[in-house]
Amino acid sequence: MRITVSSALLLALAIPVPAIAQTDPARTTVQALDDGLITIMKAKGTVRSRAAAIGPVIDRAFDLPLMTRLAVGPAWTTTPPADQQALVAAFRRMTISQYATNFDSWSGERFVIAPQIDARGGDKLVRTTLVTPGKADIPISYRLRASGGSWKIIDVFYRNSISQIATRRSDFATVLAKGGAKALVTHLDALAAKGDF
């Protein structure tokens, strides 16, 4: 059978070629966090064991130093480096405790990530929904920024409107005004210990 160039071209166009789906790296970061949360929910265990399991996931998904700086606000620039490091460490402990406390058991929950990733200046916004059987869905959005060759979360929007960083900055400002960085470290450690978020 003789195939001409034009018929070969027509054949090539008629054969479906599987599309190579490129996963957005910001989506990959959020997916890894969601997977980690489902894992600790299914494992149940103690807050301590869930914190140990989710800690490395948090470290990979979040830009905790930047989040701490944004939450502290203008006072960050006048905070001594040693106190800045202490604040980042305390913010990390609180964040891990928050997730280990709030995601404590599994009842069929799953996360659904919206297909569209929105641009916000140089940042990206990944929208997710926490779906729990028999309950209202909870929309949660993540703002991510490129950092060290990967995309990391810098803010979380509960129900797509309440900025976690803005809320924390308001809370932290009062503590900083009264007692400075050391008082804020104590405050963050108290929140981590109580799971009071």
Image (cartoon, helix red, strand yellow):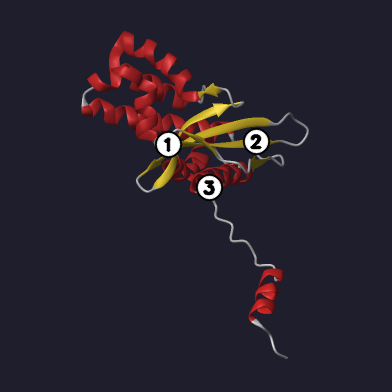
Q: Amino acid at mark 2?
A: Thr
What's the mark number on residue 122?
1
Q: Kindly indicate whether the residue at mark 1 contacts the one at mark 3 (C-beta within 8 angstroms).
A: no
Q: Which residue is disc 2 drawn over?
A: 129
Which numbered disc flags the more N-terminal residue, 3 or 2? Answer: 3
What's the mark number on residue 65?
none
> What x and y, as percent, mark residue 71?
39, 23
Q: Secondary structure at mark 1?
A: loop
State how far apart marks 1 and 2 are (Cα). 23 Å
Foreground tag (3 vs 1): 1
Q: Secondary structure at mark 2?
A: strand
**Residue 148 horizontal side relative to residue 143, left or right:** left
User: Looking at the rendering, which quadrant does residue 136 occupy?
Assistant: top right
Residue 166 position (above or below residue 86)? above
Q: Amino acid at mark 1?
A: Gly
> What x and y, as percent, mark residue 176?
33, 14
Q: Nearer the viewer, residue 83 or 70?
A: 70
The structure residue drawn at horizontal position 65% and vertical position 67%, both measured from the top left corner, is: 17
State how far apart marks 3 and 1 are (Cα). 22 Å
**Residue 157 horizontal side relative to residue 60, left or right:** right
